[in-house]
Image (cartoon, coloured by chain):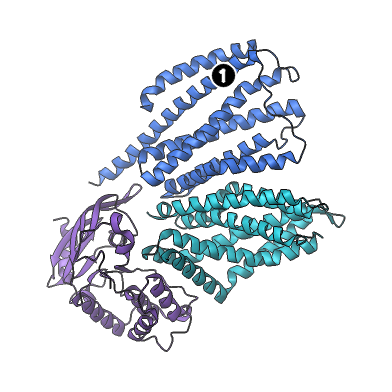
Chain colours: A cyan, B purple, C blue
Amino acid sequence: MAFARVAWLIMRKDLTVEARSRDILYTTAFFAASCVLVFAFAFVRDGRALDDAAAGILWIAIAFAGTLGLGRGFERERSNETLRALLLAPAPRPAIYVGKLLSIVALLAAIECVLVPLVSLMFQAPLLRHPVLMLALLASGTVGFAAVGTLFAAMLTGARTRDVLLPVLLYPITIPVIIAGVRGTAALLQVDADLDMARAWIGMLVFFDTVFITLALWTFEPLMTD
Amino acid sequence: MPSGSDFKFVRVADVSRHFGRRRALAHVNAEFHVGEVVGLLGPNGAGKSTLLGLLAMLLTPSLGEIRYGQTTPATAGPDLRRRLGLLAHDLYLYPELTAAENLEFFARLYDVPDASACVARALDRSGLTERAHEAVLGYSRGMRQRLALERTLLHGPRLVLLDEPFTGLDDASVRSLVSRLRELADAGAIVILATHDLDVVSELLDRAILISAGRVVADDRRPADLRGWYRHAVAGGPH
Amino acid sequence: MLNRLFMPLLVTGGLLFASAPFMIARAPYESTMGLIQKVFYFHVPSAMVMFASAFVCGIASAMFLFGKRRGSDMVAAAAAELTVVFGVIVLVTGPIWARKAWGVWWQWDARLTSSLILWMIFVAYLLLRRFGGYGSEKLAAGVALFGMANVPFVYWSVNVWRTLHPKTTVVPSLGPGMRDAFWWCVVAFVALYVALLAARVRLERGRLSLEELYLALDE
């Protein structure tokens, strides 16, 4: 199937490019870690973190790192105009979107592998006590954030002031993802973990992902053609 | 090569393109046929790149239409794109990947049959086989240009578009490119190139189209003295 | 069509607003909150118009993106601006009420927070149109579409988020005497909205004609 083939090809290419230089991976991961540190100063008092601080900090760090990674990733495409090369090809446009989405999700997954243990350690928060639900929450939340982010970052590559416009556009729209992520994580971190609540949030996120990926696939072509 | 929506000519019919208030092209009419090497000449900012972008289907006309044989972009977008190749000023290469990887990627993207053999041939033609496994980042401008040309031609396009292809090339590369373009046209491609290098292309062009301030000012078959024709047409204004 | 409606709507709206204070004064006082409750006669209709405007913008944006009709873009731009304007009314009158009812200006009330988020999405829309450079109308249409699709998610997630804390009702059920004043104000706001929309679309059409004239200069 041409669509899946193209998406896979683009994702593999992006990951190969990133694997060669690793600059986005390292700098974004480090940025995420510094975010956690900065938030620690705000939310830790007398050596103890405020309730639910760990959940909030984790997801904010993901959101910030995600925005940075998106911006830098598409900036790289822009400087060589390679996005135009992709649009020139007979590949179905939505497949380009999916390919880029997969590579961003992969990048964020790598960063979360660093973030989750870090937050868990620094805030004494047993994030992996319920590993399946936590992973489901992280996966659905990351995909939701990346789904909207990839579309917006792609459509802004040609625009002026794109660096500041990406967060301006992205954050209000992904607020439901952040709420779900934070509240779901907090539910799992409670002493008496509220698993049903976490499942409800995961459900909302999966629904969000479905709606917004569909919307993005639908609008990618008209938004990218001039 | 599958026939599908193949074409023997391209017709630009009363095409205009504006960006907000700026009119980049106004009422351009032109026709291009198989076997021709056509030069788009003109001062900077005249609209040559815009016209190439329209022909490459990267832009849509604000007014008018472009026909590729019997088909239009609206009816057969992806099929038509399979038949075009564009070599733009930005070379569309991934600097972190090697030459071989770049070519492989584009070969697979364009679904070229027998990709590996095609890539090997392309590397051979561009003389980059020895350095095929180095990152493009380390290449000189000339080498990148040769690689980019191969990338453009990998899928055997019917319409070959080139935007200032001679910039940064040394003498030998220029001559080799000129003969390559002639070969392509003789083999049945439509070759359209935008260039400032009048001396280089004076023997190559079958037709010369002068664009100035977004309009076609002159469109002549094989002018004998290209530079003189150019100067005269630029001074003279629209026909 | 919008043009012809402008004057009648403006006049109707004007008359309705002129008489609204009398209607509102005549309506009975709400038992617990006294005079301040009457802010609702403006707050709720503004919120209704704001949400309706967000949908108008979203639908017009979809028509612009997929149908490529310039007219749709004009309506979308106008509707987005009005969403922001009526949103300001909602976000100012809400805290005024909240201060009296709960003693604090902002209590992260579910509906007010959802309105704030929607408002911010459309402010982002306007920022994109203003600062995005060439081609930003189309991109903004994409944002509006995403914003509109987001409304149920925002509403649901904020609601669930807030039910973890003690909940206070926002809109008390309306007593019979209040209903007349309330609907009077709703009609007044809708009339005002459509009139403003018509005016703004006409302005946008004029601006586009100016652009076309600039282009025609070159001919």
User: Can you say whether A200 is above or below B47 in the image?
Assistant: above
Query: Is B234 in front, or is B85?
Result: B85
Residue under the point 45% across and 45% down: C141
* Amino acid type, residue under disc 1 in the picture: Trp
| Side of A127 where C138 appears, left or right | left
Query: Is B216 in front, or is B181?
Result: B181
Q: Is residue A165 visible?
A: no
Query: Is B236 in front, or is A56?
Result: A56
Q: Which residue is tagged 1?
A: C183
Q: Using a 10 Å C-alpha cutoff, classify the residue at mark 1 as few (fewer than 14 neighbours), some (14 to 19) or many (20 or more).
A: few
Percent position (x, y) of residue C35? 70, 17
User: Can you say whether C39 is above or below A179 in the image?
Assistant: above
Residue under the point 49% across and 44% down: C145
| Mark 1, secondary structure of its residue | helix
User: Can you say whether A184 is above or below C73 in the image?
Assistant: below
Percent position (x, y) of residue A94? 44, 58
Q: Quadrant of residue B206?
A: bottom left
| Side of A38 where B196 appears, left or right | left
Percent position (x, y) of residue B1? 28, 73
Q: Quadrant of residue C161?
A: top right
Q: Is residue A44 visible?
A: yes
User: Can you say whether B177 is above or below B72 in the image?
Assistant: below
Residue under the point 72% across and 63% down: A116
Q: Residue furthest bottom?
A: B130
Residue under the point 51% across and 36% down: C54
User: What subunit carries mark 1?
Assistant: C
Percent position (x, y) of residue B3? 25, 68
| Side of C100 where B147 appears, left or right | left
